[in-house]
């Protein structure tokens, strides 16, 4: 039976109005990632990092899934699909996904650096917030910064080892370990497809290029009609 692993990145949500990181005007052209996306940056200036995520949380709360999110969810409903996303937004869930592995965490969750508790993030996080479990003033966004271990790697490895197709959607393939999934898939002999605005740095067996809201529904339609 067909088993599909789909890895998504910021390009999936770009047409929903959420910025990418490395494109022209992207977040990493406006902010130094060492300041806002590392544990060291957070230790230096937690207020700056919380402001960065508070603004992104507010933007994400006003965003709606686009045709690409809806198409991936349709495929998940009709086939055996593991949706792995690097995105911290919840647009796949908003489109009706039943299971999404957020390997870089979630904007709508907070966590405690002291005890590891995790809970729904308030709209605005502040340095004076206390952990609801242990009371420590050690709360932070529940996202994965550079140098930290992504979420769910064992489950992803297991799924990749059994996959019959690996698909990357809207990701530049610059951040590891996600950037290496295509190599793992290919090493297992699993065909790989890239759906992106333009070719990334990864090596894929097949590629469709253009805006996600156009190429993803077209590709999903083809998969569903080819394998009825
Ligand atoms: C469209 C479109 C449209 C636009 N339609 N497409 C040297 C070598 C190798 C590795 C390392 C190294 N030095 C350090 C490392 C490790 C490091 C890393 O990879 N660094 C690289 C930069 C070199 N990685 C880590 O530290 C990770 N942890 C780790 O490695 O743990 C140790 C470990 C050891 C052994 C095994 C496993 C693990 C953690 C990485 C955490 C990344 N965190 C961030 C920020 C936090 C979340 C947040 O704030 O949102 O995650 S960084 C940022 O990049 C974010 C994203 O999830 C991630 C990926 O970006 P993405 O999604 O690809 O976005 P872009 O902007 O890069 O690309 C968008 C794409 O969309 C482009 O291709 C466009 O063309 C396309 N597009 N519009 C379709 N409309």
Image: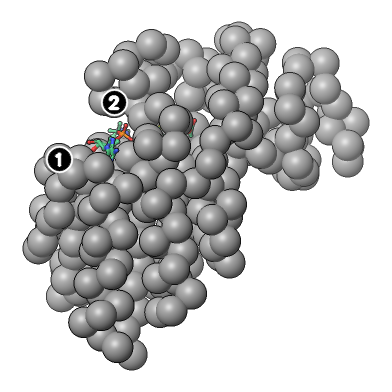
- The answer to which of 32 and 121 lies nearer the viewer is 121
At x 66%, y 39%, the residue is: 108
Q: Give percent across and percent down for residue 82.
A: 44, 68
**Ligand 1 has an atom within 8 Å of the beta carbon of the residue at disc 2:** yes
Neighbourhood count class around disc 1 (C-alpha, 10 Å): few under 14, some 14–19, many 20 upward:
some
Q: Is residue 197 above or below residue 216?
A: above
**Ligand 1 has an atom within 8 Å of the beta carbon of the residue at disc 1:** yes
- The answer to which of 173 and 70 lies nearer the viewer is 70
Judging by the rendered image, the residue that carries numbered circle 1 is 198
At x 35%, y 27%, the residue is: 21
The quadrant in which the C terminus is found is bottom left
The first of marks 1 and 2 along the sequence is: 2
Numbered mark located on residue 22 in the image: 2
- The answer to which of 139 and 94 lies nearer the viewer is 94
At x 25%, y 80%, the residue is: 225
Q: Which picture quadrant has residue 138?
A: top right
Report the mark closest to the observer, 1 or 2.
1
Neighbourhood count class around disc 2 (C-alpha, 10 Å): few under 14, some 14–19, many 20 upward:
some
Q: Is residue 196 above or below residue 143?
A: below
The answer to whether any part of residue 143 appears in the image is no
In this rendering, would 91 be left or right of 223?
right
The answer to whether any part of residue 23 appears in the image is yes
Q: Give percent across and percent down for residue 195.
A: 22, 52
Numbered mark located on residue 188 in the image: none
- The answer to which of 146 and 61 lies nearer the viewer is 61
Q: Is residue 147 above or below residue 85?
A: above
């Amino acid at each position: 039976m067909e088993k599909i692993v789909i890895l998504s990145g910021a390009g999936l949500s770009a047409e929903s109005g959420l910025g990418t990181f490395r494109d022209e005007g992207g977040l990493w052209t406006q902010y130094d990632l060492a300041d806002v996306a590392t544990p060291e940056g957070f230790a230096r200036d937690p207020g700056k990092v919380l402001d960065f995520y508070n603004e992104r949380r507010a933007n994400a709360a006003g965003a709606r899934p686009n045709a690409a999110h809806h198409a991936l969810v349709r495929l998940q409903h009709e086939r055996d699909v593991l949706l792995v996303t690097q995105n911290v937004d919840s647009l796949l869930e908003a489109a009706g996904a039943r299971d999404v592995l957020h390997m870089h965490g979630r904007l709508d969750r907070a966590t405690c650096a002291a005890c590891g508790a995790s809970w729904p993030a308030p709209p605005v996080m502040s340095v004076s917030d206390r952990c609801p479990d242990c009371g420590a003033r050690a709360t932070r966004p529940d996202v994965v910064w550079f140098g930290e271990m992504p979420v769910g790697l064992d489950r992803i490895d297991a799924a990749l080892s059994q996959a019959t197709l690996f698909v990357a959607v809207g990701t530049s393939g610059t951040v590891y370990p996600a950037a290496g999934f295509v190599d793992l898939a290919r090493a297992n002999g699993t065909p790989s497809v890239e759906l992106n605005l333009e070719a990334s740095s990864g090596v894929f067996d097949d590629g469709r290029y253009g805006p996600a809201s156009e190429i993803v529904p077209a590709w999903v339609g083809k998969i569903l009609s080819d394998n009825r």
